[in-house]
Amino acid sequence: MTPRARIALVVVGLLVLVVAFVIANGSSDTSTQQDRTVAGATTPAATTATPGATGTSTSTGQIDVPIPAVPVIKVVGAKPQGGVKRLTYVKGDTIRFTVQSDTADEIHVHGYDVHKDVAAGGKVTFSIPATIEGLFVVELERHATQIAELEVDPS
């Protein structure tokens, strides 16, 4: 076997391992994350998540891996549209959600003590490692209004 053929064989082997890794990690992690975070939606008018985009398949043989939907909490008049949203995650997941607001305020995730400012007509996205189990309040800090309830279950 020539050195060029050996290199080609090694490259193909590595490519197979990478594809297997992406399939194994992407399919179980993304579907369970999406199932948990979208579970807070109660009616079409009170949807907490935007439709998730999905990857595409190309002629180069890339794999189509779905991207999980990120829940969106819409704040209108300093109140959560459709009521307080419940977002559920498992310890070890990444807590992801977006707040879209017509009211300028500070969004505070209690327990994790994470604060972000949102401008009137703006939006802010949170991405927090779920390291603490429990039930936590997400609120408009200056208005003292709860907009979400964050639940982190044991892994």
Image (cartoon, rainbow, N blue to C red):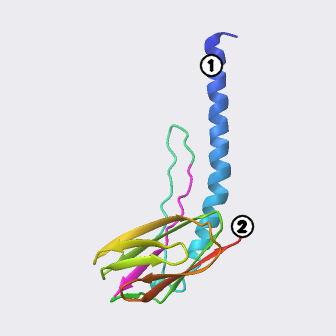
| Mark earlier in primary sequence (2, 1) | 1
Q: Is residue 70 magenta?
A: yes
Q: Residue furthest left?
A: 120
Q: Is residue 43 magenta?
A: no
Q: Is residue 40 above or below residue 30?
A: below
Q: Which mark is residue 27?
A: none
Determine which quarter of the picture holds residue 3. Answer: top right
Please, what is the three-letter code of the amino acid marked with disc 1?
A: Ile
Q: In the rendering, at what x and y percent does residue 69 appear?
A: 51, 67
**Main SS type for the magenta part?**
loop
Q: Residue furthest top?
A: 2
Q: Which mark is residue 155?
A: 2
Q: Name the secondary structure under disc 1.
A: helix
User: Mark 2 touching mark 1, by CB under 8 A?
Assistant: no
Q: Report the residue at 66% width, 17% height from top.
A: 6
Q: Name the secondary structure under disc 2.
A: loop
Q: Report the residue at 58% width, 67% height from top.
A: 34
Q: In the rendering, at what x and y percent does residue 73 appear?
A: 44, 78
Disc 2/disc 1 C-alpha distance (Å): 42 Å
Q: Which mark is residue 7?
A: 1
The boundaries of the magenta stretch are 64-76
Q: Quadrant of the N terminus?
A: top right
